[in-house]
């Protein structure tokens, strides 16, 4: 593929110089692609807290035991612990250090997404309020754990970066939208490279919250299944180093080709039934990439396994791509990782391109005959050159990414 | 980066709206910090209007004012929302319920807890399917939002609205995170040059050199210091004075955003507009 923009409306592509991910499938790229190939799900009966309702979650083992210490102790919360674990995978920290040498610490931005940040820490603090004064325990550090920005503060501290930074928090579209922020900041000359991605971890707020909405399954989630009963929550972190494609890229380098964003303008927690917002995000991503729908080899769906969500997305995907383009939701592997799902699925797509693999959909047994897109239930080997990844969130926030092989 | 400002909205203590606050911001009238009065928004349906949380009411009020002044269509204008925290009351209620023996959350409270709640209601109220982002950078959320909004103007060569707001937390969170009086501002940014703009702003992100620009009025300076969204005040004051100004806003520990504000009177607007065509 020619990486040169076809028209003024296309975005200059960026290289994914390095990327990594941690979900309940395991830590790092190798464990992730192995689980995708085996069709092995990380969902298990929820052992997290003592919930008064049954559900399955994609929990990451060992996070409770491994606290942050030393200079980083003040940042200690579940999301920052997971971010620290993730930065250690696949040599990602070393890749960022090398970029720091090339560009300077002040020329690398950190644009991350999260929806829960360190709220689990605040939940615990509220259970330990001083009985007399009502105060939170003195060790509670609002800025470094609870505040939405704390994740980017922590990551830029660990990576020793001093460029522009912020956290996007648009619910489940957050870590997809940061790819767009980074592209614009690099285009505007505010930085030369950017670390994007983010983290979300299990907490009572989301477990009880999604239960209150009546959209949590009491079984492992079954996206696009005729008998789907709702979502399973998971936790995850993922990071990507983005920079302009230079002489160092080769044919197998994966490029960010397009980002498309839209708003539903419909309802705070339900998607537009016709998937109009989703359709707009996908069309804008294709326009930014300068591609036609037929040039996309695979669509990674948002597909949370709710009745209305899957139906609305199917409608939008079928209207745009028809029945010829393979698509699947990978939520059955590691659950819905909320704000982290955008980067998790971008990494899954990148692994699909790199390893010639179309991921399937564990737990989905009978694809709903009312859904018309070409749903991939069993993963299979296939040449995958250009992919789209969808992320849709509360508040009607939609974002689609287009990734592709450099040549 | 260089952008034009085509509209502004404001709501804060003793700052009823942008138009009424101009003489206060320009230093021609004393600032009396009476409690922030947040008007209900007619962007929301009547049943939503009553139960809308503080952040939503603040954001929608200033957004609507900025668009009224700019005479452009919110339904096709991308937005950037910036806030240091979510809706304090909502977060506190959820955390209190979760700490109780038999937690049961309200679904409305849960969806109101997301950082992009005002953006969601803005999209519904204005019927806008344009892109919208909601971001946070602790005390520097306004500057982060301004960078994101200006970069979006540059990338897409179209108008973008920035809406920044912050409200207080109730106790006990207020003891861990103190925020001053509720404050919100909105700016409609446009590609420069713009004949409709009432100011042009050149933005330069650079390593921190000195201290950020402060406010002369002690009460406005206290507001600037205590409410993150009010870090916008030096820029708003420069816009209100309608004269050329240079100012700096702090951004994280290492950087500052230098802003050069130029009023339209010092530009040859007709000539630049002709060149732009």
Image (cartoon, rainbow, N blue to C red):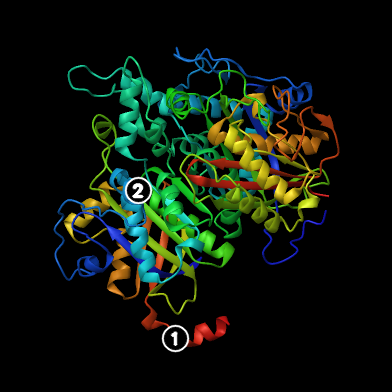
Residue A337: x %, y % from top left = 57, 30
Q: Could you say whether the residue bearing mark 1 is in a helix, strand or loop?
A: loop
Q: CA distance from mark 2 to mark 1?
A: 39 Å
Residue B237: x %, y % from top left = 28, 65
Q: Name the residue tied to disc 2.
A: B56
Q: Compared to B225, does A31 lie above or below?
A: above
Q: Compared to A65, does A184 lie above or below?
A: below
**Residue visible at 56% across and 80% down in the picture:** B276
Q: Are marks 2 and 1 on the same chain?
A: yes
Q: Could you say whether the residue bearing mark 2 is in a helix, strand or loop?
A: helix
Chain hosting mark 1: B
**Residue visible at 33% across and 35% down in the picture:** B90
Residue B119 image label: none
Q: Report which quarter residue A378 is drawn in.
A: top right
Q: Is residue B171 left or right of residue A404?
A: left
Q: Compared to B251, does A339 lie above or below?
A: above
Residue A222: x %, y % from top left = 65, 25
Viewer-nearest residue: B120 or A23: B120
Viewer-nearest residue: A185 or A51: A51
Numbered disc in front, either 2 or 1:
2
Chain hosting mark 2: B
Q: Compared to A360, does B8 lie above or below?
A: below
Circle 2: is it few (<14), some (14-19), or many (20+) Cα within 10 Å? many
Q: Is residue B114 left or right of residue A30?
A: left
Q: Name the residue tied to disc 1.
A: B268
Q: Is residue A191 left or right of residue B179?
A: right
Residue A360: x %, y % from top left = 75, 29
Circle 1: is it few (<14), some (14-19), or many (20+) Cα within 10 Å? few
């Amino acid at each position: 593929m020619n990486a040169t923009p076809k028209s003024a409306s296309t975005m200059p592509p960026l290289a994914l110089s390095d990327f990594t991910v941690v979900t309940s499938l395991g830590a790092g790229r190798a464990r992730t692609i192995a689980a995708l190939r085996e069709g092995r799900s990380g969902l298990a009966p929820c052992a997290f807290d003592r919930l008064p309702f049954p559900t399955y979650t994609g929990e990451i083992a060992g996070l409770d035991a491994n606290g942050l210490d030393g200079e980083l102790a003040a940042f200690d919360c579940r999301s920052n612990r997971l971010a620290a674990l993730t930065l250690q995978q696949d040599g990602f920290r070393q890749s960022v250090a090398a970029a720091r040498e090339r560009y300077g610490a002040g020329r690398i931005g950190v644009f991350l997404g999260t929806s829960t940040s360190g709220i689990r820490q605040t939940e615990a603090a509220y259970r330990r309020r001083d009985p007399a004064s009502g105060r939170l325990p003195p060790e509670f550090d609002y800025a470094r754990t609870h505040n939405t920005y704390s994740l980017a503060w922590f990551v830029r501290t660990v990576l020793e970066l001093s460029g522009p930074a912020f956290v996007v928090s648009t619910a489940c579209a957050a870590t997809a939208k940061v790819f767009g922020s980074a592209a614009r900041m690099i285009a505007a000359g505010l930085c030369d490279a950017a670390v994007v991605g983010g983290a979300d971890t299990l907490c009572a707020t989301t477990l009880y919250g999604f239960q209150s909405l009546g959209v949590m399954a009491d079984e492992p989630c079954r996206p696009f299944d005729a008998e789907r009963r709702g979502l399973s929550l998971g936790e995850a972190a993922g990071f990507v180093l983005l920079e302009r494609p230079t002489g160092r890229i080769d044919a197998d380098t994966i490029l960010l080709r397009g980002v498309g964003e839209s708003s539903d303008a419909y309802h705070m927690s339900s998607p537009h039934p016709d998937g109009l917002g989703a359709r707009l995000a996908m069309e804008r991503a294709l326009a930014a990439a300068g591609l036609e729908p037929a040039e996309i080899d695979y669509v990674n769906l948002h597909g949370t396994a709710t009745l209305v969500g899957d139906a609305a997305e199917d409608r939008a995907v079928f209207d745009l791509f028809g029945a010829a383009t393979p698509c699947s939701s990978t939520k059955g592997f590691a659950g819905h990782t909320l704000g982290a799902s955008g980067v998790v699925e971008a990494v899954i797509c990148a692994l699909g391109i790199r390893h010639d693999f179309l991921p399937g959909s564990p737990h989905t047994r009978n694809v709903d005959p009312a859904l018309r897109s070409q749903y991939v239930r069993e993963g299979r080997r296939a040449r995958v050159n250009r992919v789209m990844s969808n992320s849709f969130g509360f508040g009607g926030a939609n974002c689609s990414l287009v990734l592709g092989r450099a040549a | 980066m260089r952008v034009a400002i085509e509209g502004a909205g404001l709501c804060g203590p003793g700052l009823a709206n942008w138009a009424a606050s101009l003489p206060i911001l320009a230093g021609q009238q004393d600032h009396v910090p009476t409690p922030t009065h947040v008007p209900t928004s007619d962007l929301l349906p009547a049943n939503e209007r009553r139960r809308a949380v503080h952040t939503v009411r603040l954001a929608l009020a200033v957004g609507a004012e900025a668009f009224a002044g700019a005479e452009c269509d919110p339904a096709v204008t991308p937005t950037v929302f910036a806030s240091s925290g979510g809706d304090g009351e909502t977060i506190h209620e959820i955390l209190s319920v979760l700490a109780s023996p038999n937690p049961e959350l309200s679904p409305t409270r849960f969806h109101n807890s997301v950082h992009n709640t005002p953006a969601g209601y803005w999209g519904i109220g204005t019927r806008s399917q344009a892109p919208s982002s909601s971001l946070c950078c602790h005390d520097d959320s306004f500057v982060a939002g301004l960078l994101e909004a200006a970069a979006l103007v540059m990338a897409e060569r179209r108008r973008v609205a920035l809406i920044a707001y912050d409200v207080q937390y109730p106790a006990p969170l207020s003891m861990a995170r103190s925020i001053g009086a509720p404050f919100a501002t909105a700016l409609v940014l446009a590609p420069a040059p713009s004949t409709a703009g009432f100011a042009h702003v050149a933005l330069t992100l650079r390593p921190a050199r000195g201290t950020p620009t402060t406010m002369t009025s002690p009460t406005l300076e206290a507001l600037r210091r205590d409410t993150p969204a009010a870090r916008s005040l030096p820029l708003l004051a420069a816009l209100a004075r309608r004269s050329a100004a240079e100012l700096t806003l702090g951004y994280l520990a290492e950087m500052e955003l230098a802003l050069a504000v130029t009023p339209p009177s010092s530009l040859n607007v007709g000539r630049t507009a002709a060149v732009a065509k």
